[in-house]
Image: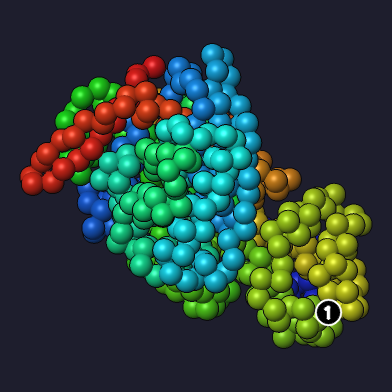
Amino acid sequence: MSVFKHNSDYNILKADLITLSLELTHEDFKKVDFLLTKEFARGLKSTKDSTIKMYLTYVRSLPNNEERGQYLALDLGGTNFRVLLVEFNRDSSKIVDCVREAIPAKLRFGAGSDLFDFIAEHVVSFAIKHQLVGVRIALGFTFSFPLQQQGLAEAHLVTWTKSFNCAGVVGFDVVRLLKAALKRKMHKSIPYVDVVAIINDTTGTLIAGALKDKNCMIGLIVGTGANACYVEKLENLEKWPFNYSDPKQVVINTEFGAFGDNSVLDFVRTIWDRSLDAESVNSGKQVYEKMLSGMYLPEIFRRVLLTLIERGVLFNGHLPLELLRPNSISTKIMSDIDQDTNMENFTKTREAIKKLFPHCKFNEVDVKIVFMINNRITKRSAQMVATGIWALAKRIKQNEVSVAYDGALISLHPYFRVWVEEKLSQFINSNAPGKKIKLIQANDGSGLGAAIVAAVCYREKRPKIIKKRGKVYQITSFQTK
Ligand code: GLC
């Protein structure tokens, strides 16, 4: 329902009507939940026949605070990558140092070997800086893209998502590519960095959350991209390739951002969702993610504003030239605008308009319209995220489920988390009144989680190799709690 229902201003009513498709009803979300539930089940049966792939991560049980020593973590997933040195002591873990580097666009769209060389060079100089000379040091690699894993340290890239499209990586084992690049950069006297595990950022977040809360069963990222992982029972996994030893569970990386790639979400997609998708580098792919993650929301916003100006409903039909530039709006600006909830003076929205369009003349009504559009887009995203979490939480047969979350949009936005919780309560109240779903912030899960997995792998040293139907599978099981 529109917040401006009773406002008589004609332009507001017009803007309200034009953008009504961005407001979904609970019936719509129930349908999205139904479709997601169906697609999750399909993905668990077979990766090939589903749009939500439900990838096996080979992470079986969650950490138990027994890890000790220093480990490296490498986090690649956005336009920056990070190298971290993490130290585990008796009762705590601490990030000793962390460096962040921007990845130039030419590397994100160039040859894969150049990208891996660039990263390896930074890893090696980071190790040298910390005088890790002449030692063997384990590295956990957080690689936040869809991977078909064959073990904890073997993973083939299925497709690039977000703002990457490097040649010569899809279909290849990214651990091998990283190891090869490290080898090229490591010389005799300098450290031997051993890549022992690869995980997704959602898995890292789940692992970091599990250290704080024993009910933590879901890892969620809502940042540049959006995705979730959760702990599934082996008995529900037709595609689990081998033994059913304890713990009888495994973390599944859903890659739910691809939901809707088979058109099932078309009933809730707007003209702006469609035009954004059509002009994206991966058109037709990651449909759900494009409706909810930080990389795409500002572009939806920009497109809606353009439509309203074109229809003469906003800024008196005058087009600020800045609006023609793709990616000219940031998620931060959208979060700022959402702070104006008292709806009296709209200070933040006013400031945002001035900042975005310095030469634009605007009035009270324009401000209200900009606020309304922004709010509709971010709220729809939060409610979509909640629906995804609800569809996963239903699969977990315990009353209390905690969701560890990370990512700039959900962590830094003033109300995103509250909106997720509100929508979750709505689902819980009408379906499972006894269920409790708690959101917990897992700071830096994608860094810490990779280091923890590296530590556990290193402790266990020799992974078991299992051969089945002519294939070799590697598995490292963690100690149970
Ligand atoms: C994209 C990636 C996924 C990652 C998510 C959040 O959806 O495909 O692997 O977890 O972004 O970074």
In front: 209, or 110? 110
- The quadrant of the image that shows the C terminus is top left
**SS at circle 1:** helix
234 shown above or below 389: above
Dot 1 alpha-carbon crowd within 10 angstroms: few under 14, some 14 to 19, many 20 or more: many
Q: x and y percent of residue 297 in the render?
A: 62, 63
Name the kind of residue labelled 1 in the image.
Phe
Q: Toward the viewer: 213 or 418? A: 213
Q: Is residue 121 left or right of residue 7?
A: left
For image coordinates 73% across by 45% down, the residue present is 414
Estimate the x, y position of residue 457 in percent, counting from the top left: 36, 30
In percent of the image, x 46 and y 21: which residue is there?
A: 67
- Pick whichever, 431 or 183, lies toward us: 183
- Is the residue 95 above or below the residue 240 in the image? above
168, above or below 52, in the image: below
Quadrant assignment, res 99: top right
User: Disc 1 marks which residue?
Assistant: 315
Percent of width and height locating residue 476: 29, 31
Q: What residue is shown at x 77% (from left), y 78% (from top)?
A: 322
Residue 351's spot in the image, x, y percent? 88, 62
Q: Quadrant of the N terminus?
A: bottom right
Visible residue check, residue 295: yes
Q: Is residue 199 visible?
A: no
